[in-house]
Image: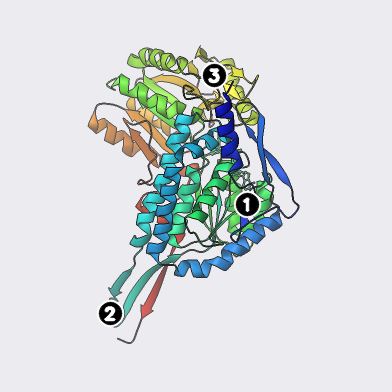
């Protein structure tokens, strides 16, 4: 049970968030006045209701973004950067309240919510510094009679669709570079976690973002609201984080107006442990790569391949660490693992484990759901997982570590690459040459080399194959929101 102080803290942070749509600088109800409920996944209790936008609301938000685009693009880069910097400072000041809010709507424990708020704020700090570094080029034409000017300009109004697993960081990772580049936008947060985004929008307003630059539409019918925006012609850019299936549909919808698209999609990360690995570091890395966000991360380790000589010890140590984790409602500081986001996600994890066990996998730890109160699943370790088990091919998005063994380097690299996904791989070895050789051979956009977390605002995050298009963060992150214009200067 919560103490009365905790309850009032929870009520206060939820009450403080606007529950309406933000369109053209005005908080407003949906055109039908409809709302939908937001639930706490740890106990299925209703937290509040938020506006349930329709397709017309989405188009009104896009119209506001389009109206604001011209003047926003003229806003000096330094001024755009300073708004982001102020927002970074406001997020930092309100760290605790924002963390509690995130825990309530998403379920992750407070310590993880705090880490996400810090990570989310870093995108604003990073892109506040990038806004003033947009530059171009000048060249003498090869014949010497002309000049080439190359300029970078904002791509135009953008549609941003964000997921529930990192409700604030996946927002700032897109909003930061859009603001820095001079793009206006319509954001559609995930249905399950709108509150962190609404709180962020209020912070950006307070930081001085002009009306219409950021518009937010919350909705329980995502596709019906976003499809008309993508087909409208006023949007020029789509950036999406979520499942590969939805990403593919959105790419198809974006084809009509030939939108510039960025896609951060699913993953199926292999985690390789060689016989010369520092096993303490490998187990620490595995805990991060598997248990961060209760495995609900596109970067989560999905398949462990451990050298046969160290497999037993690694599996035993990982199971010991996972069995010691305290599971529960994340608002208490001692809780380390929260619930899954919803019943659908819980069913999916349960199905994948049942399938693996039916095909011969051994349960070393866990393997059970607990949905008496919320959507909980026990931390689970499976060994002897056969290659035909569905969880070797599908994204688990839950606290399940399937372990297989290997002896041969080239075969394990081939197995690691045998997936349509290509977001991230992890690899533990003390042999530098092997580390670099395998990093080059892995077909993923990112590699964690003796490192269990790759996310960093200053680094280019993204995948290859069906894990996505484009990169977010780092120097390259702003490129996704810029067009290149070349001016041919003649008569010289
Ligand atoms: P999803 O792809 O359905 O949802 C992500 C976002 O897309 C949300 O904002 C959602 O409202 C929106 N969306 C859903 N359908 C849409 C549509 N037709 N048009 C426009 N927007 C739409 O993901 P999910 O169903 O919440 O989760 C399912 C699986 O997706 C997970 O099990 C996981 O494998 C994967 N996933 C990956 C990430 C990631 O970070 N790459 C994030 C969330 C989910």
Pick whichever of labels 2 and 1 is earlier in the sequence. Answer: 2
Q: What element carries label 3?
A: loop
Q: In this view, does 434 lie above or below 161?
A: above
**Picture quadrant of ligand 1:** top right
Task: Give the residue at x 25% y 26%.
Answer: 430
Q: Left of 405 or right of it: where is 138?
A: left
Residue at image mark 3: 378
Q: Give neighbour class at mark 1: few <14, some 14-19, many 20+ (Cα, 10 Å).
A: many
Question: Which quadrant, please, contains the N terminus?
Answer: top right
User: For the image shown, how many numbered marks are present on the structure?
Assistant: 3
- Residue 265 image point, x, y percent: 51, 42
- Which residue appears farthest toward the front when viewing the image? 5
Residue at image mark 2: 143
Q: Is residue 260 above or below residue 111?
A: below
Q: Left of 261 or right of it: where is 227?
A: right
Q: Left of 231 or right of it: where is 316?
A: left
Viewer-side residue, 317 vs 79: 79
Q: Is mark 1 on a helix, strand or loop?
A: loop
Disc 3/disc 2 C-alpha distance (Å): 69 Å
Task: Give the residue at x 52% y 20%.
Answer: 327
Pick whichever of labels 3 and 2 is earlier in the sequence. Answer: 2
Depth-wise, is mark 3 or mark 2 nearer the camera? Answer: 3
Disc 2/disc 1 C-alpha distance (Å): 52 Å
- Residue 445 image point, x, y percent: 40, 42
Q: Is residue 15 above or below residue 126?
A: above
For the residues bearing labels 3 and 1, Cβ distance under 8 angstroms = no
- Residue 217 image point, x, y percent: 62, 51
Which numbered tag is attached to residue 217?
1
- Residue 36 image point, x, y percent: 70, 42
Q: Is mark 2 on a helix, strand or loop?
A: loop
């Amino acid at each position: 049970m919560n103490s009365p102080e905790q309850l009032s803290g929870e009520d206060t942070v939820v009450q403080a968030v606007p529950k309406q749509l933000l369109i053209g600088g005005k908080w407003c109800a949906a055109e039908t006045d409809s709302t939908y409920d937001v639930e706490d996944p740890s106990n299925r209790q209703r937290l509040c209701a938020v506006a349930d936008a329709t397709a017309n609301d989405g188009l009104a938000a896009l119209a506001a973004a389009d109206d604001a685009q011209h003047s926003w693009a003229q806003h000096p880069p330094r001024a755009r950067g300073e708004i982001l910097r102020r927002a970074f400072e406001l997020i930092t000041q309100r760290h605790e309240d924002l963390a509690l809010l995130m825990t309530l709507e998403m379920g992750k424990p407070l310590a993880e919510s705090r880490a996400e708020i810090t990570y989310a704020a870093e995108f604003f700090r990073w892109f506040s510094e990038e806004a003033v570094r947009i530059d171009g080029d000048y060249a003498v034409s090869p014949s010497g009679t002309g000049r080439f000017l190359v300029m970078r300009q904002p791509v135009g109004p953008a549609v941003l669709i964000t997921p529930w697993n990192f409700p604030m960081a996946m927002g700032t990772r897109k909003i930061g570079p859009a603001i820095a580049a001079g793009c206006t936008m319509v954001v559609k947060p995930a249905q399950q976690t709108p509150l962190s985004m609404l709180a962020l929008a209020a912070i950006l307003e307070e930081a001085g973002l002009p009306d219409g630059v950021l518009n937010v539409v919350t909705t329980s019918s995502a596709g019906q609201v976003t499809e008309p925006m993508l087909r409208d012609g006023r949007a020029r850019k789509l950036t999406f984080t979520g499942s590969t299936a939805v990403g593919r549909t959105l790419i198809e919808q974006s084809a009509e107006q030939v939108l510039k698209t960025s896609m951060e999609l699913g993953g199926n990360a292999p985690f390789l442990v060689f016989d010369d690995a520092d096993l303490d570091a490998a187990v620490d890395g595995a805990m991060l790569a598997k248990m961060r966000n209760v495995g609900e991360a596109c970067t989560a380790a999905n398949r462990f391949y451990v050298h046969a000589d160290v497999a037993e010890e690694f599996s035993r140590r990982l199971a010991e660490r996972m069995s010691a984790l305290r599971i529960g409602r994340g608002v208490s500081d001692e809780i380390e693992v929260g619930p899954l986001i919803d019943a659908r996600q819980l069913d999916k994890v349960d199905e994948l484990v049942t399938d693996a066990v039916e095909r011969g996998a051994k349960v070393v730890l866990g393997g059970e759901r607990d949905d008496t109160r919320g959507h909980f699943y026990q931390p689970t370790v499976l060994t002897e997982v056969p290659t035909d088990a569905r969880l070797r091919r599908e994204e688990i998005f839950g606290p399940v570590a399937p372990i297989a063994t290997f002896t041969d380097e080239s075969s394990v690299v081939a197995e690691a690459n045998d997936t349509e996904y290509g977001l991230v791989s992890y690899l533990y070895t003390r042999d530098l040459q092997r580390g670099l050789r395998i990093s080059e051979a892995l077909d993923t956009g990112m590699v964690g080399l003796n490192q269990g977390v790759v996310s960093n605002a200053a680094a280019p995050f993204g995948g290859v194959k069906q894990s996505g298009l484009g990169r977010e963060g780092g120097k390259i992150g702003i490129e996704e929101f810029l067009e290149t214009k070349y001016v041919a200067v003649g008569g010289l």
